């Protein structure tokens, strides 16, 4: 599903953020991406999300080379991805329904399809009945579940999560991870950047470790 081949990333006027990174993730595989602050985790996720381009090497996503694609193709290819953030990035002046519907509106679905898919996504994260609420009236765990519903509403092939449990207590973190495992079981590939070593050890999935931009063996 995902392949990095000798990927290097250098930001202008900065050192190398990623150095000769190669790995593969299979369809339906779930992996953690870890390493200290500044190790290159966000940069690696941004290359997959097509928010940055690598300086050398190749990135393949679902059989397509996304290394040097044109701007025009990016929105189309991004539909295969669900992005989840530590700070949720919800629109606080919109309802839960509107937040989750956003990717579908961008993709041009009909009102009927949008209503059906938003309800299905909210059902998967156990938030049916909260459609009309505003994000700030929800708990942190519920807000992150809205973020997850928004990420899966387009039925993406891959989910990228950047410190998704960074603002959650251990119980809520476990709940969020359980949801990721359920997506994995239906064939979605999941890559989670996190500092949370305890969580990683408890769940026992594959771990990719970055150190100063290099991927450690193992
Ligand atoms: P992490 O997510 O593991 O904390 P990052 O990918 O954010 O690591 O950063 C890796 C390195 O690249 C750091 O040295 C950081 O300062 C640098 N970096 C990240 N983004 C930029 C940028 N837009 N411009 C210049 N340097 C950057
Ligand atoms: P994280 O550790 O979660 O990646 P950071 O505070 O390192 O968060 O980075 C926050 C944002 O700033 C990211 O988008 C990152 O790419 C960018 N960034 C990080 N380092 C630099 C830098 N040296 N120059 C410009 N932008 C940077």
Image (cartoon, rainbow, N blue to C red):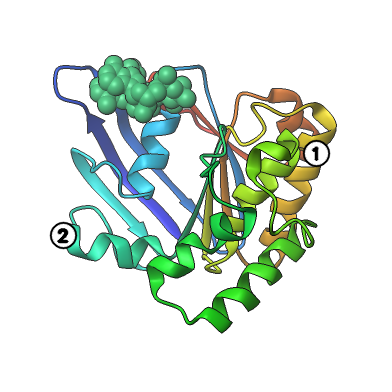
Identify the residue at horizontal 43%, vertical 56% (top origin): 2
- Local secondary structure at mark 1: helix
As drawn, 194 above or below 48: above
Residue at the limit of the structure toward the right, as seen here: 171
- 35 or 94, which is in the foreground? 94
Is residue 196 in sight in this rendering?
yes
| Residue 126 pos. (x, y %) | 80, 57
Identify the residue at horizontal 51%, vertical 44% (top origin): 91
Instruction: Check disc 2: other Cα within 10 Å, few if <14, some if 14-19, many if 20+.
Output: few
- Queried on whether the Cβ of the residue with tag 2 lies below 8 angstroms from ligand 1, the answer reads no
* Quadrant housing the C terminus: top right
Quadrant of the displayed image that contains ligand 2: top left
Residue that numbered label 2 is attached to: 70
- 167 or 98, which is in the foreground? 98
| Residue 217 pos. (x, y %) | 51, 32
| Residue 88 pos. (x, y %) | 57, 39
Residue that numbered label 1 is attached to: 174
In-image side of 72 versus 121 (left or right): left
Give the mark nearer the N terminus: 1 vs 2: 2
Identify the residue at horizontal 52%, vertical 79% (top origin): 111
Is residue 211 in sight in this rendering?
no
């Amino acid at each position: 599903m995902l392949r990095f081949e000798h990927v290097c990333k250098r930001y202008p006027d900065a050192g190398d953020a990623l150095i000769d990174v190669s790995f593969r993730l299979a369809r339906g595989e779930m992996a953690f991406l870890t390493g200290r602050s500044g190790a290159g985790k966000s940069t690696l996720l941004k290359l997959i999300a097509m928010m940055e381009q690598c300086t050398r090497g190749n990135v393949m996503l679902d059989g397509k080379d996304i290394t040097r694609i044109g701007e025009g193709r990016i929105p189309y290819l991004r539909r295969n991805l669900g992005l989840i953030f530590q700070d949720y990035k919800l629109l606080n002046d919109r309802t839960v329904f509107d937040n989750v519907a956003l990717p579908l509106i961008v993709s041009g679905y009909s009102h009927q399809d949008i209503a059906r898919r938003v309800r299905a996504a909210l059902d998967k994260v156990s938030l049916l009945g909260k459609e009309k609420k505003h994000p700030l009236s929800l708990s942190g765990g519920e807000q992150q579940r809205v973020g997850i519903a928004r990420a899966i509403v387009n039925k993406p092939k891959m989910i990228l999560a950047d410190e998704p449990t960074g603002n959650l207590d251990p119980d809520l973190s476990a709940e969020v991870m359980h949801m990721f495992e359920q997506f994995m079981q239906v064939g979605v590939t999941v890559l989670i950047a996190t500092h949370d070593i305890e969580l990683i050890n408890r769940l026992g999935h594959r771990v990719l470790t970055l150190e100063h931009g290099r991927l450690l063996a193992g």
